[in-house]
Amino acid sequence: MSARLAPPPDDTGNRPNGYDVSEGYVRKFAGTMDSSAVGVDTVKHWTPRFEGWHLIPMAGVPIVGLMFVDRFNTVSDAWQDCAGILSRLLRDDSGKVFQAADNYAAADRKSKTA
């Protein structure tokens, strides 16, 4: 497969110049990001972890049980750390995307009044 040049833009004046963006879609995307952050936080808080009282059924096999528990808790801790990072990222970036939507709306209002 060979690369081809993109067709030249349609300069007939039928389309607006610059970006044609509906701020509603941008806000909806930002809201989805924020909702995803809430979902990741929920999963993070419900990540299972073995504590002392969980080990009672494993009392018959202490060495195997302790090796399993340590590995399981390590994975659990790594997931909680990653979920925290992802949640903060989604929440912070959703705020930036909301701000971008505000900027689009302001630019649209300004271009209509000019």
Image: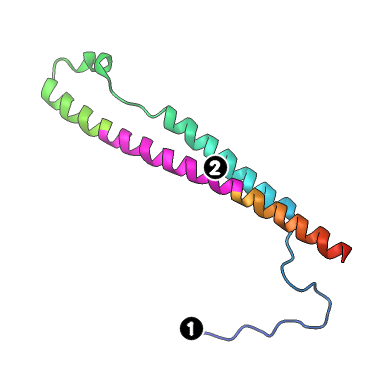
Residue 75 % position (x, y): 29, 36
Res 108 → quadrant: bottom right
Res 19 → quadrant: bottom right
Residue 107 % position (x, y): 76, 61
Position of 67 with respect to 8 (left or right) is: left
Position of 101 with respect to 35 (left or right) is: right
Residue 90, compared with residue 76, is above or below; it is below
Residue 11, compared with residue 113, is above or below; it is below
Magenta range: 74-95
Instruction: Specify the label residue 1 is tagged with.
Output: 1
Mark 1 is surrounded, within 10 Å at the Cα level, by few (under 14), some (14 to 19) or many (20 or more) other residues, namely few
Q: CA distance from mark 1 to mark 2?
A: 41 Å
Instruction: Specify the label residue 91 is tagged with.
Output: 2
Position of 22 with respect to 14 (left or right) is: left
Mark 2 is surrounded, within 10 Å at the Cα level, by few (under 14), some (14 to 19) or many (20 or more) other residues, namely some
Residue 106 % position (x, y): 77, 56
Main secondary structure type of the part rendered in magenta: helix
Within the magenta stretch, is there residue 63? no
Secondary element type, mark 1: loop
Q: Looking at this rendering, what residue extends furthest in the left direction? A: 63
Q: Amino acid at mark 2?
A: Arg
